[in-house]
């Protein structure tokens, strides 16, 4: 695809929220997409974006969008054929189906359809081939649009670190403990009285999501379905006073026992699905393996690769199982909006999304 | 022991540091002990305490101590027969031996002698009977004093939650993940640029300490030695921007598989070693089990029982092993100075420390 | 009043919110009052308190209250003659009037009636004599109850530090800059994404409140009204990532120019209105003047005097005006619930609130 | 100056510290300068940079520098004619003089020589013309090198917001209250136990620096000296738990009383010294004036203009003086290393630093 090519117009559903804003930042000046429509709840519809939204982070990316009118999340009003959904799960289920029925391709961050057997749950470098499920979904549901999901933010960070190891050594058991940033809860999200100088060892609904999505992400495409990976997963999920970046401690056992050196080699050499190599959002290194004793750290490593690189460190022998390590990635970029954008890029590269 | 009894004079070694200051707060107005001597490094010796030290927390406990002269950590200068050691591990090893040789009873927070076979490593409610090792130590080392240690702060919090479960169901495997407060690193300790809005997934030397001390703490006294408990331990240790309170996620397997209900019952009914019931520092509940979905939390639960209670929550089934739970306790009180003071109280109650 | 005396039953309006909870902590085991009724919004009414509320801080103070039914904020349902109002200002205006009309004495934290000419705005040590306005209020409004208010949290902290100086040297100009804790915004209050690692130089409506309330607090009672103090006030108000404790930098000019030494002497010798000396909530020192170069600090000094003492430090010469200093006090205790409770105590001591 | 031009080799003194590292980030890929030499204390000299230093922030900018040998801060060893000094003030005084004597041009962040009458104290957009003092310095001190300083970080932020107002309306009185980021104290700097959840209302030596440097920065060049601006300054300086970005509340009086609208207009239209317009580090807007009610905020605005833009907000009428406003800027970029680099650029543009 050449630089001269006309950009593909896209819409963001839920554009006023925290994830919606991250979509806007990532789509501003995107080489392939043009952010044409901003949709949000009825309460915001009709207002100028600048009035309907409270911008949370950094400079506003495209001044002209401040005056653009927000439209309602109605497939009859949205003209773009490609829509990114930053909708809250309380409404995403039905709205996304309505858009898919209306022929739109929905790239969704919401949890609602992730585990539907015919809905791809995709991290491009890890399981980009799962996008092939879309054909099956269209046939089965008899619609021309479709729903493609990206995973829970913690599941995304974990899956990227686990993919090369699972590929090389076959995972048996995965013990995970997360320390998750407050931006994972959206805005207003976590009250400051709950988290300043504190740790909350519980995130509602997070552990089951993390445990089940990993199996699908690292599963294999077989005919029309995903056969989940067969390893077992156990997790603790915690909220910590960090702005962006989920840090995950992992303790792992494998069928083919790797040494720490072999594990590091597998992590270092992994470049992910080849089809992703030329995608605009693809970082040079999807994984970065640190030799420093005290990394990864969210404040210091979270923006690596524009927020699309997952940093892994402390790869070491485990006294009970085989390997321990720590992984960290940007929860609202790699683990949310950036993941969706890259999924869309992959659909462009494979011809599913047609050029403008 | 009656209220009228004369108090036993004690000294604090390393009185100017963070743990030393916690000792001073806990010994102020102690019903059995009187803080008679403040010892610190040569640099501080000879100065008034108020000039040698920078008080870190709350109001200064006993105004008259501000003018007291700091003495050097020299057994020839310290008259008290009972000394609490808040010394840094870089000097504690030799200094504590010198005091024990000189006939002093040293209650130590330092790591140096914890794993010596003849040195008791004690949490009174958990393994108060291990204090009997002291007789052996005196005989073997031919000294009249002695060294009694308390455990690493994380090991202490973990051991208290594990003790009732190990007793009832016999632990096989322990996976731990800690989120540790900055006060665990002393003062000045962790630079703010390293930890504000951040998580550091590494604490130098902490994981081996935690893994080996748990076995000794939950081991059994047999003749003249401690037979370590036979379960396996694997840990991740992390620093988080919390002032006080170490939070520990644990995933556990047992020989006798408990249901979560049975595990909670064992935790709730545990009252710890009977001999501790009348000790001044003993909290009503050494363990508190929370039913709330999102507890324990350091900011909200750390001062429970005057900082001597460990709070346990989220006791639930594990999808791989048997039980998952979260424990949290005060690292500088229960996990350091308060633990030492309670060890000394137990030695008074058992007659090893003689009344004044 | 003797210890044996029967306690006076009181109600808390808005008991489920952050300030309501602080009232509950301060009224638990209060020597004069008994927390008899918990009132809140229609949404909570009828539920057990433990179900209607999310307890924010420390241990729950009186276990039996967890099962008590919350009642609506309706003067027909509340039997206590004394009610503490922790209501939000969006509803406090009308509800408090309804209670006063029904003969209740309302001790209010809300801003709504603070500047009403016949409503006392009181900090007992500073202007306890202003409570005499109540008689006028009753006559003018023809009701048997009444409304007594305490000041905005920042105004309270500032007024306590200014009172002795104004008394001794007559204030002319007051420049204030606050750094306010997040608990001042209630719960859920400030989103963590807004304040972790950040400062917000704006608090809606705070500056005008602070500027106008100071004049009334330090004003003089003259016949039936308060003649406001004549000094000028200018303020900047900021939110900082601190849990409790508002810190205020002040730069001051006076009619009678004091030296810093004279100012410190006035602050140190001030004991406040004599009538407060025997009130249960009255701290030994309403003001504490620190000599340390870097105090007051919210984390270290906020709980001084049970949260009722205001700490003052850095009293020094100003290069433009006369004196600079820093004051800090607990915003939800001295600056909110504790202030109301002490106002009620003063009304008991003066016979306005009759014994049970 | 054309892009093809050979780069000018420069050295950083104190390259291992926090400000030294910021210099390295800013000089990496600089269009005019090439970071040729890294100098630090004797302790580091001889080591590879990667071993001598602990990298604090983000990705390391130029991989090849990790292996470069650190040299001592000795003018006999440093070959570059232009050196940036990030030295601590405990050593900067003498070392900088030694370099200047040896013919080097020293761009210094240290406080030591800022107030020397013949040493320029410069923010290019504000008082770039003061660089002319250098000729006088060379003559007077009889050296071929020279010392050029940039101001204290808070003074820099304040001076940029004040410059257009002083120019237009002539300042009379300046009341400042700062909330300063921890990075201003270097590394390790502020202990986390001192600042997490806290505010410290004192920074050693900061208030006098801030008060005296403002007069020189906004002073006028007259023959061979700077006539300080005649307005009076009074300040409170505070440390807050923010990583980067000093926020300053200001209350101002002027000889020509501006309305808030006139003040905003002056701020908005100010573009600073013309000679800076083409300098590489010069941001498009040296000042950005926000209309949002709650800005500037360090976390959200600090990286504006690559950390070189100062954001001003809340310009409003003052009830006592004339105008109140809040300014915020990046303390280690605009307020330290970035300021020095821009001073050097200005010396290149004016021909004082000769091309390579």
Image (cartoon, coloured by chain):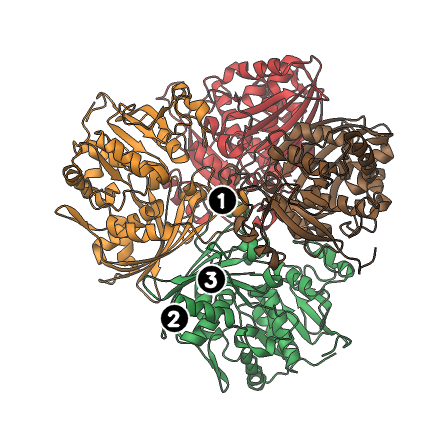
Chain colours: A red, B brown, C green, D orange
| Residue A164 percent location from the top left of the image | 60, 17
Q: Answer above or below: position of A275 versus D208.
A: above
Disc nearer the start of the sequence (1/3): 1
The residue under label 3 is: C206
Left or right: A37 in relation to D133: right
Outermost residue on the front side: it is B76
Judge by depth and name the residue closer to the eye, D142 or C342: D142
Disc nearer the start of the sequence (3/2): 3
Q: Are marks 2 and 1 on the same chain?
A: yes
Secondary structure at badge 3 equals helix
Q: Are marks 3 and 2 on the same chain?
A: yes
- Other residues around mark 1 within 10 Å, as few (<14) / some (14–19) / many (≥20): many
Circle nearer the viewer, 3 or 2:
2
Disc nearer the start of the sequence (2/1): 1
Q: Is residue A255 visible?
A: yes
Per the model, the C-alpha gap separating discs 3 and 2 is 30 Å
The image quadrant where one finds the N terminus of chain B is: bottom right
| Residue B62 percent location from the top left of the image | 63, 58
Circle nearer the viewer, 1 or 3:
1
Question: Circles 2 and 1: CB distance less than 8 Å?
Answer: no
| Residue C295 percent location from the top left of the image | 49, 56
| Residue B234 percent location from the top left of the image | 71, 26
The residue under label 1 is: C197
The residue under label 2 is: C258
Judge by depth and name the residue closer to the eye, B160 or C116: B160
Judge by depth and name the residue closer to the eye, B114 or D161: B114
Outermost residue on the left side: it is D223
Q: Is residue A152 visible?
A: no
Q: Answer above or below: position of C2 versus D13.
A: below
Q: Quadrant of residue D5?
A: top left
């Amino acid at each position: 695809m050449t630089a001269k090519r006309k950009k593909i117009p896209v819409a963001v559903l839920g554009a006023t929220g925290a994830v919606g804003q991250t979509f806007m930042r990532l789509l501003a000046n995107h080489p392939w997409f043009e952010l044409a429509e901003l949709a949000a709840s009825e309460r915001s519809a009709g207002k100028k974006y600048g009035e309907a939204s409270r911008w949370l982070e950094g400079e506003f990316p495209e001044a002209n969008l401040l005056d653009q009118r927000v439209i309602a999340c109605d497939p009859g009003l949205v003209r773009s054929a490609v829509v990114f959904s930053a909708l809250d799960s309380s409404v995403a289920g039905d709205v996304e189906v309505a858009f898919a029925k209306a022929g739109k391709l929905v790239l969704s961050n919401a949890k609602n359809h992730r585990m539907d057997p015919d809905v791809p749950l995709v991290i491009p470098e890890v399981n980009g081939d799962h996008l092939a499920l879309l054909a099956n979904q269209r046939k089965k549901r008899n619609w021309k649009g479709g729903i493609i999901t990206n995973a829970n933010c913690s599941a995304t960070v974990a899956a990227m670190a686990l993919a090369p190891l699972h590929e090389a050594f076959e995972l048996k058991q995965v013990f995970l403990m997360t320390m998750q940033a407050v931006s994972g809860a959206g805005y207003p999200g976590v009250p400051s009285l709950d988290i300043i100088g504190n740790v909350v060892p519980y995130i509602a609904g997070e552990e089951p999501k993390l445990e089940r999505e990993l199996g699908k992400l690292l599963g294999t495409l077989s005919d029309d379905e995903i056969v989940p990976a067969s390893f077992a997963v156990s997790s603790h999920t915690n909220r910590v006073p960090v702005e962006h970046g989920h840090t995950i401690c992992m303790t792992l056992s494998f069928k083919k026992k790797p040494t720490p050196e072999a594990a590091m080699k597998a992590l270092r050499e992994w470049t992910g699905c080849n089809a992703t190599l030329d995608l605009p959002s693809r970082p040079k290194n999807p994984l970065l393996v640190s030799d420093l004793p005290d990394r990864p750290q969210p404040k210091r490593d979270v923006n690596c690769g524009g927020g699309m690189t997952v940093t892994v460190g402390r790869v070491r022998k485990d006294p009970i199982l085989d390997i321990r390590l720590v992984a960290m990635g940007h929860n609202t970029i790699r683990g949310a909006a950036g993941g969706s954008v890259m999924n869309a890029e992959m659909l462009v590269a494979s011809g599913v999304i047609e050029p403008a």
